[in-house]
Amino acid sequence: MQRKIHMTILPLLNNSLFHRGFSSKSKVLHPVLCPQLLQDAKVVIPVSMVRYEKDKEKFDTELSALFQYMANKLEQEEIQSVDILATTALHEDWPDSKIAEIDDHFFNKHAKIAKKQMKFLLWKDWIKQRGEQIHQKYYEEVLELSKEGSEWYKLMLNTHSRVSIGSSLEISLSYQRKEYAAIRAMNYYTDLVYMGHISSAWSYLYELYPNIPRFVRVSMQPQASQIKNYDADAAVKIVTASLEQIVSSPNFPPKQKEQLKEICHNLFRTYTSTGLMPHHGYREGVLSDMRVKM
């Protein structure tokens, strides 16, 4: 009998929410930064393009959420600037046609959000902007410090074995060294925002050069959409009215009525705890109202 009650109440609750034009499954992505950006930060976001080979649509959704988050920070004058770097050219084993295709897609999809103090840059253009000679100097420095047998070299080998960077060890090492040389040249920025975990070889870079920008990892978390108070109130009224019809039946056993009330209260507690009913006082009022009616 309890299984049957569950099957009865769940459609009622969901249907009442859908009746108001709300889907309990709708999600929006929210960027979570760790640590938080510094006040008046100068942000650089190197975008690893390898994910376009794996989950293009999901990656675009995450990037859009991140870039909109940064645009909002700029509008609110919480940060100073944002440079977004398309690192496609770092993939030496990708043909030029593939690099061009991914870059075109990336800029057409995302660069339109760019505003004052927010730039989208190709890797090669950013290198020219910062200085090709400076980058080459740092590359040679990284090359020397990460020569075969060194601690840094071993960490790069570990990164290669764990992360799909290139089709061979040689290409992977070249990618890492060019990337680390570029980070070495990023002392203009305060925060480096990256969508992914920091590798052990990248972490080692901070032991050598403490003045490079802070590593800020961004992860995407789904955030349940919230319905407004009047929508929640309407949903509760629809559900409780249906419940009143069910429990008022003379054929409904008293024992099962108590079970139904408890199940219903638990369901609403679950929904309210996920943020569907945003205000604590309002949530308590909803549950109290249900207890009175039932």
Image: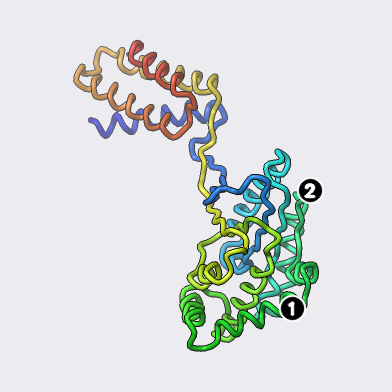
Q: Residue at x 54, y 85 (%)?
A: 169
**Secondary structure category for the residue under label 1:** helix
Q: Amino acid at mark 1?
A: Asp
Q: Disc 1 designates what residue? A: 96
Query: At 70% across and 46% down in the image, what residue appears?
Result: 71
Q: Is residue 23 left or right of residue 88?
A: left
Q: Which marked residue is nearer to the observer: mark 2 or mark 1?
A: 2
- Which percent across, then down, holds residue 147? 55, 87
Q: Residue furthest left?
A: 255
Tell me the tag on residue 245. none
Quadrant location of the C terminus in the rendered image: top left
**First in sequence: mark 2 vs mark 1:** 1
- Does residue 245 show up? no
Q: CA distance from mark 2 to mark 1?
A: 29 Å
Quarter containing the N terminus: top left
Q: Residue at x 63, y 56 (%)?
A: 191
Residue depicted at 33% across the width and 18% down the height = 246
Q: Nearer the viewer, residue 200 or 197?
A: 200
Could you tell me residue 75's position as x and y percent? Answer: 73, 40
